[in-house]
Image: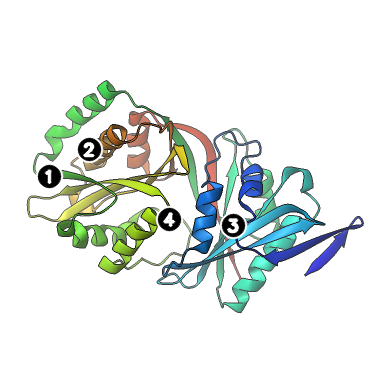
Amino acid sequence: MSCEWSGSTYTTKTCCARTGRQARAADAYERPYAAFWSYDDGVAQLRMHNPTRELTGFVAFEGNTLIGGSNLAFPLLDNQHLAYAEPLVRPGFRRRGVGTKLLNAVIETMRARRRTTLIIEAHKPLDSESSPGWSFLRHHGFTPGILALHRVLDLPASAEHLEELGKAVEPHHRDYRLVTWQDRAPDEWVPGVCEIQSAFNEAPSGELELEAEVWDEERLRGGEERRRALGRSETSTIAVSSEGRVVALTEMMITDHRKGAVFQGGTLVLPEARGHRLGMAIKVANLRRFQGTTQKATLVHSWNAEENGPMVRINDALGFRPVEHLAEMQLKL
């Protein structure tokens, strides 16, 4: 597939892993806190069999110069109407139709797979109502599905501050036990963790049309094995009620390929256990464990829906600071 602009030919083709370094340059342009997986991690993801999703990609060339690309992910176990993409164009080659070419290739592939809803992230500065990515997606008919704030926390967090926060909420959750582990969930907690993972659809999702994910032991253990193969390490903390039920979960992840950056995973407290300050309790416990086992981490990245007031307040108290807006933009075909 090719097209010409101003005498130059841009070709879009399916690729395996050549987008990594160029994608980083495009994604981080004018975004000092851009968060992305490393090149090595991206290569490993594309080469790894993953029964929960199909991952492919496209790249755009000018001659022999790679100037842009996009991944394309199809969920396989649930949400089979969705596709996720991330078209990126190197700064010096923008406004030439390259992004549109990539987007059209993504949509063409979606239609062939009978996927009806495409989700792409768009970032914009805190002090701006728009950005090139935001404008590009709006121009092509995307609408905001949910708005979030990208926050970061400098590490190491103050041990004294964490101690203070932990003690302040302790009287509220005396009937609950906190359990923390590294990488592999203890067998006894697997059913409860699966229940929590399936309940994440209760978190704010705005206008996004998302189905609840169904989790079982096979899916959980498979995810753990793939993380180990990718060189990722995850720290998790749960809260357990006096009846032995898992009622809250939080996660943090770091990759061997990029030791400085940490990614805050999901945090959820089941409705019947709310009001006991468990959200703060599990995040403090998890961060303490993480800092005790990981020495090279410098920055935690977290994304919170702006409408999720309780989690926003928890992260503010922990010391997270906002650095940019993130929108999950949605296009229905």
- Kindly identify the residue that appears in the image at 34 percent across and 27 percent down: 157
Q: Quadrant of the C terminus?
A: bottom right
2 vs 4, front mark: 2
- Residue 135 screen position, x and y as percent: 68, 49
- Kindly identify the residue that appears in the image at 45 percent across and 55 percent down: 206
How far apart in space, not on screen, are marks 2 and 1 (Cα)?
A: 10 Å
Kindly state the secondary structure of the residue where label 4 is placed: loop
Q: Which residue is mark 1?
A: 176
How far apart in space, not on screen, are marks 1 and 4 (Cα)?
A: 28 Å
Q: Are marks 3 and 2 in contact (CB under 8 Å)?
A: no
Q: Are marks 2 and 4 in contact (CB under 8 Å)?
A: no
- Residue 320 screen position, x and y as percent: 41, 31
- Kindly identify the residue that appears in the image at 22 percent across and 24 percent down: 164
Q: Is residue 306 visible?
A: no
Q: Are marks 1 and 4 in contact (CB under 8 Å)?
A: no
Label 4 Cα crowd, 10 Å radius (few <14 / some 14-19 / many 20+)? some
Q: Quadrant of the N terminus?
A: bottom right
Name the amino acid, label 3. Answer: Thr
- Of 71 and 233, nearer the camera is 233
How far apart in space, not on screen, are marks 3 and 4 (Cα)?
A: 14 Å
Q: Which residue is mark 2?
A: 281
